[in-house]
Image: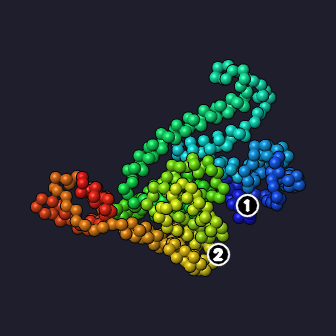
Amino acid sequence: MAQSLAELGRLAHTLGLTVVDTITQNRASFHPGTYLGSGKVAELKTAVTVHKAGVVVLDHELSPSQARNLEKETGAEVMDRTAVILEIFHRHARSRAAKAQVEIVRLEYMAPRLREAGKGRDRQRGGIGGKGAGESGMELDRRKIRDRIAELSAELRSLEEEQSTQRARRRTLNRVALVGYTNAGKSTLMRALTGSEVYVADKLFATLDTTVRTLHPETRPRILISDTVGFINKLPHGLVASFKSTLDEALEASLLVHVIDASDPAHERQLAVTAQVLAEIGAADVPRLLVFNKIDRASDEAAACVRLATRWPEAVVMSARRSDDVAHLRQSLIDFFGRHLVEEDLRIPYSRQDLRGEIFEHCQVLEERYEENDVVFRVRAAPAHLARLRAA
């Protein structure tokens, strides 16, 4: 419970809220009307008054009636864990796809929580655009939500077709997807590995959009690195489903780099949560490299390194802020893909020198020699690329 509440506090901090008090409840079952028992409701009401708090955040999903009753009792806005996560996603979404995905889930969350507000909202109204005399204000709002969800879903399908086309072009390339718990340092690692100016912030869910960059300095064949949305315990199921496009990067990757915050006491639980979500999207069998990041933040770095190396001997223990550590990880990625390369001669007629650019892009050219009718390239490359070049 302590770890979950600490995480909820970080979620609140990401929203710009300051935690002024924490109240816990131990009881066999949740109160159907207010989630909290009557004694805890009274304690919460007192805390809100004493601290002049404007928001109450609960580490559980509330029913619409429970949230409404608690707001009446406390006089403060009540947000459950799902509402907090949805608001963070809403604020951090940048691309059209991410904004549409978040809005769909928010609308689905809001629909059952609609309640009439203001005078006259319960009156029936008809007219142009309405169902007639039988449609209430609430029903009209719900219909608008359904229409908006349908509109956003159509937009998403169009965007997903574009993204699918882009992924198809990269299908023959070596692709690495950074996955892991939110705030594990994936974006910092992405920046270190690719030399790109991707968005980095010490906040939960700082990255919602898929970013794809080339490993830097570039290798031949090239290795593409993609950052993905972070996972979290009790992530609303709708968000996992709605972010299918960014999670597809993990599903279609050649290698998953599972990034874990080595300095977080709850890192084993976070590792398990990520593994569970990867299994849910069908990526459980994709090759995986464990990377324990932020080791420089551990209270006793040397002891932590020994413990992690003993428990996970194949893992990389590092800090994305140390160049030597990043270079070691980079070499690990190169070695992984190097295992699948073969060294052969590629004979290209002079009439097909248009293939020269593709050869240098997808192969390590070890030697180039000119013969009477052909140019012969000694290359290291994936068998699939060699077969495609020979068939061209």
Nearest the viewer among 21 and 182 is 182
Q: Outermost residue, top direction? A: 127
Nearest the viewer among 1 and 52 is 1
Q: Earlier in the sequence, mark 1 or mark 2?
A: 1
Q: Amino acid at mark 2?
A: Ser
Instruction: Tell me the residue at 39%/60% (across/down).
Output: 174
Q: Which residue is mark 2?
A: 299
Dot 1: few (<14), some (14–19), or many (≥20) neighbours within 10 Å?
some
Instruction: Tell me the residue at 42%/70% (across/down).
Output: 331
Q: Quadrant of the N terminus?
A: bottom right
Does the rendering let one see residue 92? no
The image shows residue 130 at horizontal and vertical percentages of 66, 23
Which image quarter: residue 337? bottom left
Which image quarter: residue 345? bottom left
The image shows residue 110 at horizontal and vertical percentages of 68, 41
Residue 287 shown left or right of residue 18 in the figure:
left
Count of marks, rendered view: 2
Nearest the viewer among 27 and 173 is 27
Q: Is residue 275 above or below residue 171?
A: below
Instruction: Tell me the residue at 69%/48% (across/down).
Output: 83
Q: Amino acid at mark 1?
A: Leu
Residue 74 shown left or right of residue 301 in the figure:
right
Residue 353 shown left or right of residue 293 in the figure:
left
The image shows residue 388 at horizontal and vertical percentages of 28, 55
Task: Estimate the spatial distance between the alpha carbons at disc 1 and disc 2, rounded to whole Å.
Answer: 22 Å
Q: Which residue is mark 1?
A: 5
The image shows residue 204 at horizontal and vertical percentages of 62, 57
